[in-house]
């Protein structure tokens, strides 16, 4: 009996020991499976977080694209409006040009003789320039006008509008020639200087040249009785040199008064 009991107890112990080993292995499997599950869950969470970030970026890019699209649409609308306005302005300009051409044609037709000869204004002038024989004074045809050039040094004290004593004889000869050749024409008196600095009381070449021209106008209207309505004054300063100002002789030539004789109806 003791032998059988001992065998039974031993068998129970073996069974218990085997059960403990199986239970330990099962717990290890359970732990490994839980670790795998947790790792998968962590990976899924990481991916979900990445997807959220990407989704936010996509929303941001979409909002920016929509804003740019709106700006481009506004620019296109503005360009269309500008193009429409330009087309309107072009049409108006073409209309004005057409109206101006019709007006010219009408005026041309109204100035035509019965025989078909058009009435033309006197746009040119000519004279015997050889009769103006005054030392230092030049006369030339300049397009539709006659230009009489008088050296400023023969008329004025240097750098001023003060007439010199011998200027009276020179102006008398010039006005006598004009009276014979151009008794009723308009006369422009143009003052010119060189490019050298001006002195007080003048602040610029234009101021000096205009004051010189005005001094000649005062003489022509006062002393020589030329109708003031025929006279005009222009001060060109140093803007219209005849020759280079690089030399003293060139500067002297550029200091001048031009009497410009206009055709009938000129100016």
Image (cartoon, rainbow, N blue to C red):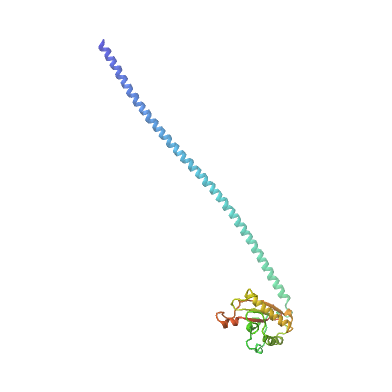
Does 60 sit left or right of 1 as displayed? right
- Front-lying residue, 223 or 143: 223
- From the image, which quarter does the C terminus lie in? bottom right
Q: Residue at x 47, y 39 (%)?
A: 49
Kindly indicate the quadrant of the structure image that contains residue 261: bottom right
Residue 59, percent from left and from top: 52, 44
The residue most toward the front is 200
**Residue at x-position 59% and y-position 82%:** 252
Note whether 169 is above or below 190 in the view shown. below
Marker count (numbered): 0
Whether residue 262 is visible to the viewer of this picture, yes or no, is no
Quadrant position of residue 78? bottom right
x%, y% of residue 149?
Answer: 64, 83
For the point 45% across and 36% down, the residue is: 45
Q: Nearer the viewer, residue 232 or 68?
A: 232
The picture places residue 62, in percent across and down from the top left corner, at 53, 46
- Relative to 238, say whether 165 is above or below: below
Instruction: Name the image quarter holding the N terminus.
Output: top left
Q: Is residue 48 left or right of residue 209?
A: left
Could you tell me if residue 5 is visible in this image?
A: yes
Residue 254: image location, x then y, percent: 60, 81
The part of the image, by quadrant, that contains residue 92 is: bottom right
Q: Is residue 229 above or below residue 22?
A: below
Depth order, front residue of 231/183: 231
Q: Out of 175 and 156, give the one closest to the viewer.
A: 156
> Residue furthest toward the top?
1
């Amino acid at each position: 009996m003791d032998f059988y009991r001992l065998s039974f107890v031993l068998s129970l112990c073996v069974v218990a020991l085997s059960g403990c080993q199986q239970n330990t292995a099962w717990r290890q499997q359970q732990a490994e499976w839980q670790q795998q599950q947790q790792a998968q869950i962590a990976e899924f969470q990481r991916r979900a977080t990445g997807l959220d970030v990407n989704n936010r970026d996509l929303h941001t890019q979409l909002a920016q694209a929509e804003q740019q699209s709106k700006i481009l649409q506004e620019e296109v609308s503005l360009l269309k409006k500008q193009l429409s306005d330009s087309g309107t302005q072009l049409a108006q300009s073409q209309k004005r040009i057409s109206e101006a051409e019709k007006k010219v044609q009408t005026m041309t037709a109204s100035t035509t003789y019965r025989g078909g000869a058009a009435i033309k204004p006197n746009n040119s002038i000519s004279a015997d320039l050889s009769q103006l024989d005054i030392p230092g004074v030049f006369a030339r045809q300049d397009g539709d006008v006659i230009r009489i050039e008088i050296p400023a040094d023969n008329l004025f004290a240097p750098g001023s509008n003060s007439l010199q004593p011998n200027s009276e004889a020179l102006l008398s000869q010039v006005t006598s020639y004009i009276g014979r050749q151009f008794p009723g024409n308009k006369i422009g008196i143009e003052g010119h200087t060189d490019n050298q600095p001006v002195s007080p009381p003048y602040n610029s070449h234009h101021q000096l040249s205009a004051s010189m021209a005005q001094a000649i106008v005062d003489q022509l209207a006062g002393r020589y009785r030329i109708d003031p309505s025929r006279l005009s004054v222009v001060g060109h300063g140093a803007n219209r040199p005849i020759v280079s100002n690089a030399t003293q002789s060139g500067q002297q030539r550029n200091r001048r008064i031009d009497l410009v004789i206009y055709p009938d109806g000129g100016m």
